[in-house]
Amino acid sequence: MVPLIPENAPFSAEQRAWLNGFLAGVLSRGSAPAGASLPAGGTQHQEPLLVLYGSQSGNAEAVAKKIAKRASAGGFSARAASMDTVAASALPAEKNVLVVTSTWGDGDMPDNAQSFWTSINQNGSSPKLKGVRYSVLALGDRNYADTFCLAGRKIDERFAELGAERVVGRADCDVDFEETAEHWSSSALAALGVAPAAKVTEESEEVGWTKKKPFAASLKANNRLTSKDSAKDTRHIVFSLKGSGMVYEVGDALGVYVSNCPEVVDLVINQQGLDAADTELREKLTTQYEIRHLLGKPRGEFSFETLRKLQPRLYSIASSLNAHPEEVHLTIGVVKYEDGGVQHKGVASTFLSERLALNETTGVFIHKANHFRLPTDTDVPIIMVGPGTGIAPFRAFLEEREATRSKGKNWLFFGDQRRASDFLYHEEITAWLQSGHLTRLDTAFSRDQENKVYVQDRMRQSADELKRWIDGGAYFYVCGDAKRMAKDVDAALREIVGESTVEAMRKEGRYCRDVY
Ligand SMILES: Cc1cc2nc3c(=O)[nH]c(=O)nc-3n(C[C@H](O)[C@H](O)[C@H](O)COP(=O)(O)OP(=O)(O)OC[C@H]3O[C@@H](n4cnc5c(N)ncnc54)[C@H](O)[C@@H]3O)c2cc1C
Ligand SMILES: NC(=O)c1ccc[n+]([C@@H]2O[C@H](COP(=O)([O-])OP(=O)(O)OC[C@H]3O[C@@H](n4cnc5c(N)ncnc54)[C@H](OP(=O)(O)O)[C@@H]3O)[C@@H](O)[C@H]2O)c1
Ligand SMILES: Cc1cc2nc3c(=O)[nH]c(=O)nc-3n(C[C@H](O)[C@H](O)[C@H](O)COP(=O)(O)O)c2cc1C
């Protein structure tokens, strides 16, 4: 955003920031918002603010909570709420609504936005939003070209269709969302007449090791879980957290900083005719940018401005701290594929499985997953569906429930290509089954017979029992492939227990998904 109020204007820094945001809002909507006034040391505003979020892995939730905190610290009545906790019928009474949502799956709403989205799209009974002032911040990833920020785009359009007044234009964020989110929230708050505190203290969010300040964890183990004759290479990776004081809960993911393969860097340098002796350029290509799209591209297509920043990758944590103090375990599927005659290696999965040597370190941080937690009541039964690498958090759940002597029953659905080569954590799972800790195990080895068998087929085969567990209060968890498996499992669950039960489970936090 270009500042409109010059630095030498007779305003304090806070007033200048507010005015810039305010004017940006006015310019985008053509008139001043009613009730807006310049902060004179914490102006109060009459209408409360609702910051609605749709979030799968916590980014949009964190942004929404920060905005509400900033507005509250500025003396304003504001609250952040997950979309599935707000009834659409209550929306017209909300006069100031900011929506922050990510897009998930294949251009889908995040799980906690789905029922809200359905409720504002009912023919005839959708709420009329005349008198509601709003703006949308959409979080996404430009790699998903056609579905980039689709959930936010849809909500933005729908609010306008229902008669709400857009006070500032939607902002669409790529993976590095912080700066755009900051600019959007300043202008949106100003346009709504909210004078936020210039900066809220972020100590609580910034304590310990974070994405900005990762811990250098050393690699302690890298073992192949699939056998040599498997079509897949899936690894069990162990990092030491010794000395970090780092704490995670089962369900959380680990963020891992990685670098590009030196051979791929060499190839790009050669193919693009870059200076092979330029060590600074080589370092930048190795550690700072995604370069796989450059492979096979004609010479001369290179410029740093067009490259995307290399992002840390997330992995579901496969261990419990109670079972493995000061360690974090991961289950990593090594990505290798051919595209247009060019061989590609997944950056992070090959970094962790092939390039990081034992005892070498890389930066890690905990990515909280508050939507994916064990029931607090340890007597409650759980059903876990985790084919392939989707098994990761369920190994952690089973370790945790064993360490805490939880009495709740545990039912696991696992699947992969072949029993002989791809039964991940086979020994541990079999031991849990024999000890009775795992109440029930259903496996679906897709390629062990002529026709494919998947986890959802096993669910259907045990539909009555599954329904009994769910009617008895069981939590239902899904982890792994988002594009196909999670959709098919969702369809099977709806078939077995009915749409309304699934929606109720979602609202009660008993249907939890960690899909990617
Ligand atoms: C919350 C969360 C938890 C996760 N947990 C796990 C986990 O427990 N275990 C795990 O292994 N992964 C997990 N992932 C996925 C992980 O973060 C990485 O995305 C994965 O390891 C691939 O990263 P990479 O850097 O190796 O591959 P990248 O270099 O990012 O390459 C992957 C990309 O290559 C392309 N691609 C891949 N295969 C093909 C193909 N056959 N044809 C054409 N293009 C293709 C796709 O665009 C894909 O996005 C998780 C992701 C999230 C968001
Ligand atoms: N977003 C990312 O960057 C990223 C990166 C890596 C992996 N992933 C996803 O994560 C998934 C996990 O990979 P993985 O190798 O551990 O396991 P996977 O590919 O999900 O395979 C595990 C088992 O699921 C089966 N399966 C295939 N389609 C299914 C469906 N529609 N419903 C139910 N089961 C199905 C597979 O069978 P068949 O193979 O025999 O059909 C296999 O037996 C990948 O599929 C991929 O989509 C995403
Ligand atoms: C499995 C998966 C699917 C995604 N699908 C999309 C998509 O279709 N379009 C998009 O713009 N972003 C997509 N994203 C990117 C997320 O929207 C982005 O990471 C966002 O910051 C997540 O915010 P959240 O933690 O609040 O859910 C996807 C991310 C993952 C891991």
Image (cartoon, grey):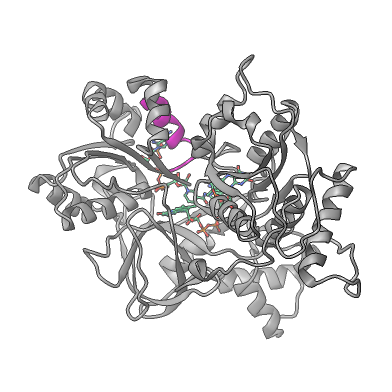
Q: Residue 128 at what x, y percent from top left?
A: 69, 23
| Direction from residue 85 to residue 311 in the image, left or right | right
The answer, for residue 226, to whether it is visible in the render is: yes
Q: How many marks?
A: 0
Q: Residue 250 at what x, y percent from top left?
A: 32, 56
Residue furthest out toward the top: 124
* 336 or 359, nearer to the observer: 359
Residue 460 sits above or below residue 76 on the image: above
Kindly identify the residue that appears in the image at 37 percent across and 24 percent down.
501
Residue 162 sits above or below residue 417 on the image: above
In reply to whether residue 483 is colored magenta, the answer given is yes
* 361 or 300, nearer to the observer: 361
Kindly identify the residue that appears in the image at 34 percent across and 30 percent down.
456
| Direction from residue 359 to residue 6 in the image, left or right | right
Main SS type for the magenta part? helix
| Direction from residue 140 to residue 360 in the image, left or right | left
Q: Residue 486 at what x, y percent from top left?
A: 43, 36
Kindly identify the residue that appears in the image at 43 percent across and 28 percent down.
503
In reply to whether residue 403 is colored magenta, the answer given is no
Please give the range of residues in magenta. Answer: 480-493
Q: Residue 174 at what x, y percent from top left?
A: 67, 54
Kindly identify the residue that appears in the image at 70 percent across and 38 percent down.
153
| Direction from residue 146 to residue 462 in the image, left or right | left
The answer, for residue 454, to whether it is visible in the render is: no
The N terminus sits in image quarter: bottom right
